[in-house]
Image (tube, rainbow, N blue to C red):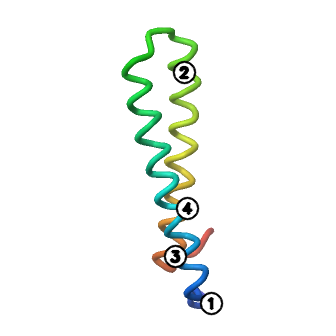
Amino acid sequence: MDRTPLTGAETARLKRREAEILGRIERLKSTMNDTKALDTLAFKAKLLKEAQAELRRVQDKLAGLSED
């Protein structure tokens, strides 16, 4: 596995992105609790899954894991 270490700027950018995604996940979770319409819940659940997948990718990159 050929891994190049992240630069300080890349690490800082990924940490900011991680914080943004975590904030988005928390907002989605709280609004899902207040939502009663099933179609809106389904859409927000889809957005939540996408945000969690993106968070996983960012955290893997920060950990130096391959994107494969």
Asked if the residue under mark 1 is in contact with the one under mark 2, i.e. CB atoms within 8 Å, the reply is no
Q: Secondary structure at mark 4?
A: helix
Which residue is label 2 attached to?
A: 42
Q: Secondary structure at mark 1?
A: loop
Distance from label 1 to label 3 (Cα)? 10 Å
Sequence-wise, the earlier of marks 4 and 1 is 1
Residue furthest top as drawn: 37
Asked if the residue under mark 3 is in contact with the one under mark 1, i.e. CB atoms within 8 Å, the reply is no
Which residue is label 1 attached to?
A: 2
Task: Judge whether 30 appears above or below 36 on screen.
Answer: below
Q: Which part of the image, by quadrant, shows the C terminus?
A: bottom right
Counting from the top left corner in percent of width and height, residue 58 is at: 54, 64
Could you say which is closer to the camera, residue 52 or residue 34? 34
Q: Nearer the viewer, mark 2 or mark 1?
A: 2
Distance from label 4 to label 3 (Cα)? 17 Å
Q: Secondary structure at mark 3?
A: loop
Q: Tell me the quarter of the picture where residue 35 sits.
A: top left
Sequence-wise, the earlier of marks 4 and 2 is 4
Q: Tell me the quarter of the picture where residue 31 sits.
A: top left
**Category of crowding for the residue at label 1, using alpha-carbon neighbours closer than 10 angstroms: few (below 14), some (14–19), many (at least 20):** few
Distance from label 4 to label 2 (Cα)? 25 Å
In the image, what residue type sits under mark 4? Arg
**Category of crowding for the residue at label 2, using alpha-carbon neighbours closer than 10 angstroms: few (below 14), some (14–19), many (at least 20):** few
In the image, what residue type sits under mark 1? Asp
Which residue is label 4 attached to?
A: 17
